[in-house]
Image (cartoon, helix red, strand yellow):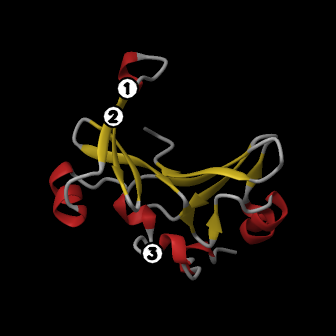
Amino acid sequence: MFWLAAAVPSRADEALPDPASLIGLTLEGMVSQFGIPKSVYALRGLEEWQDDVVFVYAQGDFYVYKDRVWQLGLNAAYDIKIGDPRGRVLLLLGEESRNFADHSLFSLPSRGWPLELRINFDSTETVSALFVYRPDF
């Protein structure tokens, strides 16, 4: 069963009806499509190769390595939004999701590389963060 890509976007993610389509976007493509970011910051990884530059837009945080977007941090995607209860998310994702104590993973259709949706949960069992990313990166 795969219905998630066709889900109706919620109000919070109307500007990004298919966030997965932005993974792999070049810097030039990102700026031409979304304009100048509201802010930019560096994010240190555990290893030097895991360092990112994050471009902050109203639509979400665009994590860039070298010259390509490899991850998006979003307030909402695929009819899931920050603050949703874990039970709702699990109903939406169905049995194809992989569930852990503090997050769930759902494989998205490939676009030349694997893609995943990660939903983080806080101690109250509500969504605290949403990411669409390349797990092979």
Element class at badge 2: strand
Query: Mark 2 belongs to which amino acid?
Result: Tyr
Residue at 80%, 69% in the rendered image: 91
Q: Quadrant of residue 10?
A: bottom right
Q: CA distance from mark 3 to mark 1?
A: 28 Å
**In this picture, is 60 found above or below 16?**
above
Q: Residues within 10 Å of mark 3 (few under 14, many from 20)?
A: some
Q: Which residue is mark 1?
A: 51
Residue at 29%, 51% in the rendered image: 38
**In this picture, is 32 found above or below 63?**
below
Q: 119 or 6: nearer the eye?
A: 119
Of callouts 3 and 1, the N-terminal one: 3
Looking at the image, do the residues carrying marks 3 and 2 touch, with CB atoms under 8 Å apart?
no
User: Between tags 2 and 1, which lies in front?
Assistant: 2
Looking at the image, do the residues carrying marks 2 and 1 touch, with CB atoms under 8 Å apart?
no
Q: Quadrant of residue 137?
A: top left
Q: Which residue is mark 3?
A: 17
Q: Which residue is mark 2?
A: 41
Of callouts 3 and 2, the N-terminal one: 3
Query: Mark 3 belongs to which amino acid?
Result: Pro
Please provide percent x and percent y for residue 119: 65, 52
Of callouts 2 and 1, the N-terminal one: 2
Q: 34 or 100: nearer the eye?
A: 34
Q: CA distance from mark 2 to mark 1?
A: 11 Å
